[in-house]
Image (spheres, rainbow, N blue to C red):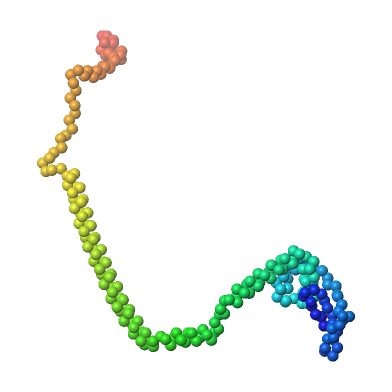
Amino acid sequence: MLRHFDHKNRRDIVSKETNSTPIWQANDYAVIPVPAVACDYVAENTSSYLDAELDLRAMEQIANHLNNCSNCAKTVAGVESVGLVLEREWSDIAPLPSSLEIEFALDSIMDALPPLHERTHDAKHADTSHSTRWVRFTTGIVGGALFVASLWSSYQVGFWQGRVSAFTPEPGYHQPLPVNPIPSVSTPAPPSPKPPETTLFHNYHPKRFAPNVI
């Protein structure tokens, strides 16, 4: 028995085979019911369904579900259209070169180069001339920097000497000492200190109170 999947009518057709030659007659066709599947199953296997990577039973189940579910049918149709666009875009891109083409290109580049000893000789001369130019350039920069530094130092010395001489007094010049102001006549004299108070004990004398001695 051979199974033939009719993608247009989404039917499972069974044909009889006699001597390896199928005989297609009207009574040889029979419709076999296919179990239904959920939308999640269709969403997970959409890519495999479009690439025909599933077995015949799974293809039949998804095809039957697409006939009965308009949402899944629109989703599969959109994915299929995107795949066709990508396939057309990728076909316009040139294929990557093979390893033999890369080796041939490298050999062509190496053959176009001069021999190794000539490249080494040219590199030595180029390095020498480059180093000579670099030494001359560096010497000029250092000399200019030293000249500018000497001018700046001389300017600073003259500037500070002028500032110091401006604040230095001339010889023989003496600054007058500060003089205390003389008090005027109308200024009252400060009061004299009071004498210490005398007490009985200060006027005591031993002879005045001594008893008469006979």
Q: Quadrant of residue 117?
A: bottom left
Q: Farthest left residue?
A: 172
Q: Nearer the viewer, residue 44 or 151?
A: 44
Q: Is residue 58 visible?
A: no
Side of 106 relative to 64 (left or right): left
Q: Tell which residue pokes out farthest to the bottom in this image.
A: 19
Q: Tell me what residue is drawn at x 57 percent, y 76 percent.
A: 93
Spot occupied by residue 94 in the image (x, y as percentages of width and height) = 56, 78
Residue 77 at x, y percent in the picture: 71, 68
| Residue occupying image coordinates x 28% and y 14% | 198
Q: Quadrant of the C terminus?
A: top left
**In this rendering, is residue 138 above or below 182?**
below
Above or below for 165 versus 21: above
Q: In screen coordinates, is 188 left or right of 109?
A: left
**Which quarter of the rendering shows the N terminus?**
bottom right
Q: Could you tell whether 57 is left or right of 126 in the image? A: right
Location of residue 113 by image quarter: bottom left
Seen in the picture, residue 10 relative to 171 is either above or below; the reply is below
Percent position of residue 73, x then y? 74, 67
Residue beneath the point at 77% across and 74% down: 8
> In this view of the protein, which residue sits in the foreground, 167 or 173?
167
Which residue sits furthest right?
27
Q: Residue 131, can we see it?
A: yes
The image quadrant of residue 19 is bottom right
The answer to which of 142 and 193 lies nearer the viewer is 142
